[in-house]
Structure formats: structure tokens, C-alpha cells
Image (cartoon, rainbow, N blue to C red):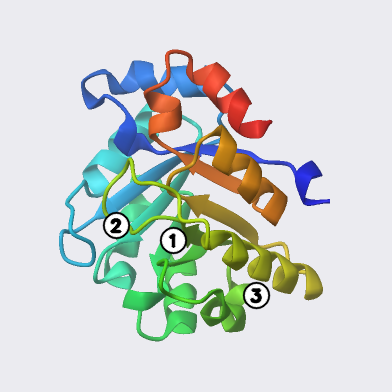
């Protein structure tokens, strides 16, 4: 059953205190997080600007956690080699900005990383179905991408259910990730819908105890 699915926690580094980045990463490592989620924004594809490969490389030197890099940028394929070289383990692109999504997935995989594809809230999950067998992960955005701290959009649950059904029907091992407005209450809803990976920023990095926050997301 979905509720028994092994759940991976990917704290979003954007919610961390960058003046104390190493100690912040240590806290989520010790708290049991398996991944770190790195949101890369270019102020063009989404209305915010974050960081590039240089910061990813710095984070890579600080941790052995799996680096889950989400490219919310206009040219994900063109920049993927730089993020792969910086130490990303998985690179996710947006189908809305990739042109030929199948070709984008192939080109990103050629850089030597795992590959994910994401959809914004207004994009139906079905656009991912033709490329599911090329993907290690699908990312459902449960807020409009661009800024942290937004409220969870409950309609994203139906997307997760649709992807879970299609992935299971085809016997694929593609993981389902959700990002946006995740707290213990919404985590439970997405877990029941069939999610595998939870991205949580504020709920983890701004918590008094990241370890307790991570445990709460799992249960």
C-alpha cells in the first residue's frame, strides 16, 4: 500500500541559513535526510534568481548526501553538463521549457547523472507518460515554482495518484517526488497518494529540531 512505501526526505537548501550552511547540512544529515534538494532558478523561467553550478560544487564538498538538482531555467539541457560536473546526482528539468522532452531526457542522461522531469501546477501529469521509461524521477510541483513558503495545492494529489497508477501499471521504478507546501499534514496526504520523495524546506530547516521535523514528515 502507498502508506507503507519507503519515503525519502529531501530538505530544500533554499530554506537553509547560507551563513551557516555546513552546520545546517550536518543537522539534516544527522536528522536522517537521504537527499538534498537544490532549486536552481534563472529569473526567466520562474520569477526568482538563486544559484548556479559554483554553489552546487560547494555543497558537494560539504556532504555525501544525494544531490537532487531541480533546474527551473530556460535552457536546462545546455546547462546540465555544468551541474553534472559540479556534483549533482540527479538533474530534473521542466517539460514546459524543454521542447522535445524525450530528447532533453536523453541529453541530460548523457552527462552521467540520473534524470527527472517536472510539471508545474497547470500542466497535466499525462504529459509525462510518454517519457516515464526514460526517467528516474518525476517531480510534481504542488505550488507555483519560484518562491518557498507557499501553501500546498490539494489538486496536486490527483496528479500523484495518476502517476502512481501509470508507473505501477507499467512496472516502472520511476520515483514520484512532490515539492511545495510540505508539512506533516500535507506529507501524509501525498504519502497516501503514492509519493516516494518529499521535498521540504521551511518545515525542516526552520524547525527547532530538524531531526524531529524529518521524523514527523515520515509519519
Rendered location of residue 42, percent (x, y): 19, 59
How packed mark 2 is, by other alpha carbons closer than 10 Å (few <14, some 14-19, many 20 or more), is some
Determine the CA span between mark 1 and mark 3.
Answer: 15 Å
User: Considering the numbered disc 2 on the image, is that residue within a helix, a strand or a loop?
Assistant: helix
Give the number of the disc on residue 92. 1
Whether residue 126 is situated above or below residue 145 in the rendered picture:
below
Q: Quadrant of the C terminus?
A: top right
Instruction: Give the residue at mark 3.
Output: 133
Of label 1 and label 2, which has the lower sequence position? 2
- The answer to whether 202 appears left or right of 115 in the picture is left
Q: Are marks 1 and 2 in contact (CB under 8 Å)?
A: no
User: Considering the numbered disc 1 on the image, is that residue within a helix, a strand or a loop?
Assistant: strand
Q: Nearer the viewer, mark 2 or mark 3?
A: 3
Q: Residue at x 44, y 75 (%)?
A: 123
State how many labels appear.
Answer: 3
Instruction: Give the residue at mark 2.
Output: 82
Q: Residue at x 49, y 82 (%)?
A: 102
Q: Residue at x 52, y 63 (%)?
A: 155
User: Considering the numbered disc 3 on the image, is that residue within a helix, a strand or a loop?
Assistant: helix
Query: Closest to the observer: 199 or 78?
Result: 199
How packed mark 1 is, by other alpha carbons closer than 10 Å (few <14, some 14-19, many 20 or more), is many
Amino acid at each position: 500500500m502507498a502508506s507503507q512505501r519507503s519515503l525519502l526526505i529531501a530538505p530544500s537548501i533554499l530554506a537553509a541559513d547560507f551563513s551557516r550552511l555546513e552546520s545546517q547540512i550536518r543537522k539534516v544529515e544527522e536528522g536522517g535526510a537521504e537527499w538534498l534538494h537544490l532549486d536552481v532558478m534563472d529569473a526567466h523561467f520562474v520569477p526568482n534568481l538563486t544559484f548556479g553550478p559554483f554553489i552546487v560544487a560547494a555543497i558537494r564538498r560539504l556532504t555525501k548526501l544525494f544531490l537532487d538538482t531541480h533546474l527551473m531555467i530556460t535552457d536546462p539541457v545546455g546547462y546540465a553538463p555544468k551541474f553534472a560536473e559540479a556534483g549533482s546526482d540527479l538533474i530534473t528539468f521542466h517539460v514546459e521549457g524543454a521542447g522535445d522532452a524525450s530528447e532533453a531526457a536523453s541529453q541530460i542522461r548523457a552527462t552521467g547523472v540520473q534524470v527527472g522531469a517536472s510539471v508545474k501546477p497547470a500542466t497535466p501529469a499525462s504529459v509525462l507518460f510518454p517519457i516515464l521509461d526514460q526517467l528516474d524521477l518525476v517531480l510534481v510541483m504542488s505550488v507555483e515554482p519560484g518562491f518557498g513558503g507557499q501553501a500546498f495545492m490539494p489538486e496536486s494529489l490527483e496528479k500523484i495518484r495518476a502517476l502512481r497508477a501509470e508507473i505501477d501499471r507499467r512496472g516502472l521504478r520511476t520515483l514520484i517526488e512532490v515539492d511545495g507546501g510540505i508539512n506533516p499534514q500535507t506529507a501524509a496526504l501525498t504519502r497516501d497518494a503514492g509519493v516516494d520523495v518529499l521535498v521540504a524546506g521551511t518545515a525542516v530547516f526552520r524547525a527547532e529540531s530538524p531531526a524531529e521535523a524529518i521524523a514527523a514528515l515520515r509519519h
